[in-house]
Amino acid sequence: MKKKVLVADDNPYVLELVSMTLETLDFEVILAMDGEEALDQAKREGPDLIILDIMMPKKNGFEVCRELKQSQECREIPIIILSAKVQKEDKFWGRDAGADDYITKPFDPLELGKVVTQLLKLKESGRGYHPLTKLPNHPSIEMEIKRRKEAKEDFSIFQMRFPEEAILIFQQKYGGLKWEEFLVMTANILREQVERWGGRSCFLGHRGESTFVAIGPAEALEKIGRAAGEEVSKAISLFYSKEDLARGYVLRGQEKHPLLSFSYNIS
């Protein structure tokens, strides 16, 4: 049976181009030309994947994405935002609405086909990845732990966390985009250290919003923790003003709030 993909866009030319791309890959394509029709089609047809434009009549793509991700029947459907809006803020709001990926127009049909195929494979396998850092997400982490247990491997689990209060204060003062930049930098630091000290013996994932998880030999994880901890500490200082760093806290009114920090443990 063919996989069904719902495509919502108010531009007939874009609908035709996306349809041709997907039909070439043997997908069944369902079309919608406004946000309300997209919601109706999603609930009625139960597509395997949804592609949304942002600027549509009646309801925009962010609204549609958010409603679908909050609905019981549609929340597991992968959603791609396909839009001419290319600012970082637009991509931020796409992720905030729950989109699994964001592709800008004009788009490369080959890239679109690759992303659609990848998301469907991840859905079928039960795996997925964090939309920002592109690291394996919670279900993928749990599946990796299960796989290693079944193989009777000797492994430990490393977890690096950032406190919620400090994250909230940071976002309020410096903005969501700065927080995302910091997350990406942290993910890249961990990637480098996992590759350096663990190589293929280690697995790295991103659980929820603020927890990174590595799985592998305890000795390697200890080295990763020490090296990554030093680099992340340096990175934190790059994201605060000189005044906040000198004080050692964020001042909001008369209240003092902690700077970003992290803790990690190996179990």
Image: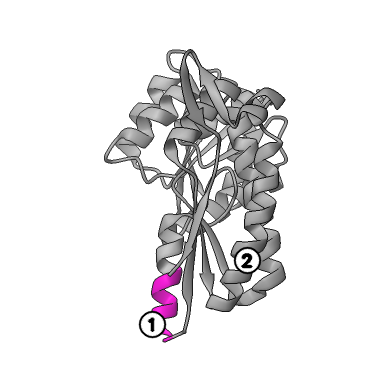
- In this view, the residue in front, 175 or 228, is 228
Extreme residue toward the front, this view: 247
Dividing the image into 4 quarters, which one contains the N terminus?
A: bottom left
From the viewer's perspective, is residue 216 above or below residue 168? below
Instruction: Give the side of residue 116 with respect to residue 245, left or right.
Output: left
Instruction: Give the side of residue 75 with respect to residue 171, left or right.
Output: left
Closer to the chain start, of discs 1 and 2, is: 1
Give the secondary structure at mark 2: helix
Number of numbered tags placed on the structure image: 2
Which numbered tag is attached to residue 224? Answer: 2
Instruction: Give the side of residue 158 with respect to residue 233, left or right.
Output: left
- In this view, the residue in front, 7 or 223, is 223
- Which residue does the image show at 72% across and 69% down from the upper left? 196
Residue 97 lies in the magenta-colored region: no
Q: Which residues are magenta?
A: 144-152
Crowding at mark 2 (Cα within 10 Å: few <14, some 14-19, many 20+)? many
Nearer the camera: disc 1 or disc 2: 2
Task: Let me know if residue 87 appears in the view.
Answer: yes
Q: Position of residue 161 (x, y in %)?
A: 48, 50
Give the secondary structure at mark 1: helix
Task: Let me know if residue 7 appears in the view.
Answer: no
User: Three-letter amino acid code at disc 2?
Assistant: Ile
Q: Position of residue 105 (x, y in %)?
A: 69, 30
- In this view, the residue in front, 201 or 43, is 201
Identify the image quadrant of residue 182: top right
Which numbered tag is attached to residue 174? Answer: none
- In this view, the residue in front, 262 or 74, is 262
User: Three-letter amino acid code at disc 1?
Assistant: Glu
Q: Which residue does the numbered mark 1 point to in the structure image?
A: 150
Crowding at mark 1 (Cα within 10 Å: few <14, some 14-19, many 20+)? few
From the viewer's perspective, is residue 83 above or below residue 212? above
From the image, give the main secondary structure of the stretch colored magenta.
helix
